[in-house]
Image (cartoon, grey):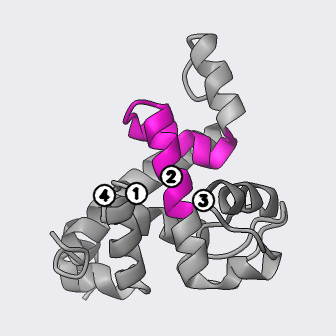
């Protein structure tokens, strides 16, 4: 029995991965990933890493919702994308949170010329930190951020494999 469990953990067939890594809001993920030129598995992986698909998640730093956006970041996104009546409570709305988070992740990917690792590092540690590390020609300086980037990259592959049809592959 233990051998079977170890085998499943190592091989992670799609049905097993779906047990451990659920995909909620797949239509929103697919639509906003397409709109912002993102890999839908990457977007799902960020949501899993940030909130485990809990739309009411809130961090000690004040980040809210599925993609753990801070109110100040979300307000800026709302204004930039034409919104005029942003409220913090909007961030617990899955549609709004995924839309804003996808836009922000897409913005970071453009800023870092498609560099996914840098965009993920900026999503986690802030764009100012990543820009400084780049200007100083050093790698990601926070262990937590290096771990985050590795986790999201691993989750992206799991979501791509486990939910290929739901994510439009």
Give whichever of discs 1 and 2 has the lower sequence position. Answer: 1
**Residue 95 drawn above or below residue 157:** below
* Image-based side of 127 in relation to 25, left or right: right
Give whichever of discs 4 and 3 has the lower sequence position. Answer: 4
* Label pair 4/3, CB-CB below 8 angstroms: no
Label 3 CA crowd tier, 10 Å (few <14, some 14–19, many 20+): few
Q: In which quadrant is the N terminus drawn?
A: bottom left
Q: Residue at x 60, y 59 (%)?
A: 81
Residue that carries the numbered disc 3 in the rendered image: 81
**Residue 154 drawn above or below residue 100:** above
- Disc marking residue 105: 2
Q: In which quadrant is the C terminus drawn?
A: bottom left
**Residue 2 % position (x, y):** 29, 82
> Distance between the Cα atoms at labels 1 and 3?
12 Å
> Distance between the Cα atoms at labels 4 and 2?
11 Å
Q: Is residue 72 magenta?
A: no
* Quadrant position of residue 4: bottom left
- 45 or 104, which is in the foreground? 104
Residue that carries the numbered disc 1 in the rendered image: 36
* Quadrant position of residue 40: bottom left
Q: Residue at x 29, y 66 (%)?
A: 158
Q: Main secondary structure of the magenta part?
A: helix
* Label pair 1/4, CB-CB below 8 angstroms: no
> Distance between the Cα atoms at labels 1 and 2?
8 Å
- Disc marking residue 21: none
Residue that carries the numbered disc 4 in the rendered image: 39
* Image-based side of 74 in relation to 15, left or right: right
Give whichever of discs 2 and 3 has the lower sequence position. Answer: 3
């Amino acid at each position: 029995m233990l051998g079977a469990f170890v085998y499943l953990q190592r091989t992670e067939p799609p049905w097993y991965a779906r047990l451990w890594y659920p995909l909620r809001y797949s239509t929103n993920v697919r639509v906003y990933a397409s709109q912002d030129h993102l890999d839908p598995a990457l977007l799902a992986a960020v949501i899993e890493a940030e909130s485990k698909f809990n739309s009411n998640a809130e961090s000690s730093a004040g980040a809210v919702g599925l993609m753990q956006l801070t109110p100040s970041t979300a307000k800026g996104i709302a204004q930039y994308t034409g919104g005029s009546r942003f409220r913090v409570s909007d961030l617990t709305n899955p549609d709004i949170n995924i839309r804003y988070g996808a836009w922000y992740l897409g913005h970071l990917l453009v800023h870092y010329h498609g560099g996914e690792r840098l965009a993920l590092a900026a999503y986690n540690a802030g764009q100012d930190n990543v820009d400084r590390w780049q200007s100083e020609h050093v790698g990601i300086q926070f262990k937590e951020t290096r771990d985050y980037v590795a986790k999201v990259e691993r989750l992206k592959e799991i979501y791509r494999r486990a939910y290929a049809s739901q994510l439009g592959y």
